[in-house]
Image (cartoon, grey):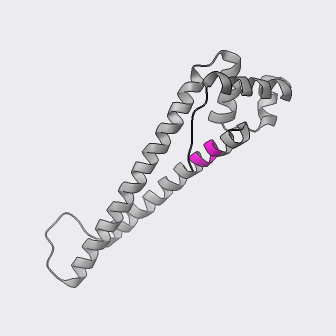
Amino acid sequence: MSTKELYKKVSNKRKRIESIIRNLKGLKEELDCLGIGDHYFTETQNDESKIKAKEDLLRQIDEMQKELISIENSLRDFYEAIKKLPDDYREIMELRYMQNLPWSQILLKTNRSRRWALSKQQKALCLMDIKYSFEE
């Protein structure tokens, strides 16, 4: 996997986490709007449809929470591998992947050339022995 592909996949994972969090908030608000608590329901059609809607929302929330945990775990493993790198390599990887900085800002912060930074990034990935699939 190229460094550009890896960066894109890590960025996509971050965006997906943000999206899931927004969706979870929306689903929980919908759940609150149903006005269904954990109390006894009468056997009317309206209550049955509310119960079905509640179950569907709870299922969606559960699926999103599981996906969120999976994404967070894959990123956490990746970030832990970055933290174990020697200083020069770790600095570049933290700035690029953990702080999500563009190369222009990384070069200013490190006061290094683009060639140096890209070389350190490539060597860091080799040291990390990247085996992260980061499936979409």
- Residue 32: x and y in percent read 33, 66
Lateral position of residue 121 relative to residue 38, left or right: right
Instruction: Pinpoint residue 109: horizontal percent, then vertical percent.
Output: 77, 27
Q: Main secondary structure of the magenta part?
A: helix
The residue lying at 34 percent from left, 61 percent from top is 59
At 59% from the left and 50% from the top, the residue drawn is 15
Is residue 126 on the magenta stretch? no
**Residue 107, position in %: x, y?**
81, 29
Q: Could you say where residue 73 lies in the image, as x and y percent from the top left?
A: 47, 38
Vertical position of residue 18 compared to residue 107: above or below: below
Q: How many marks?
A: 0
Quadrant in the rendering for residue 27: bottom left
Q: Is residue 48 left or right of residue 65?
A: left
Report the span colored magenta: 9-13
Residue most extreme to the top: 86
Q: Determine the residue positioned at 57% across, 51% down.
A: 136
When the figure is inspected, residue 113 is found, relative to residue 76, above or below; the finding is above
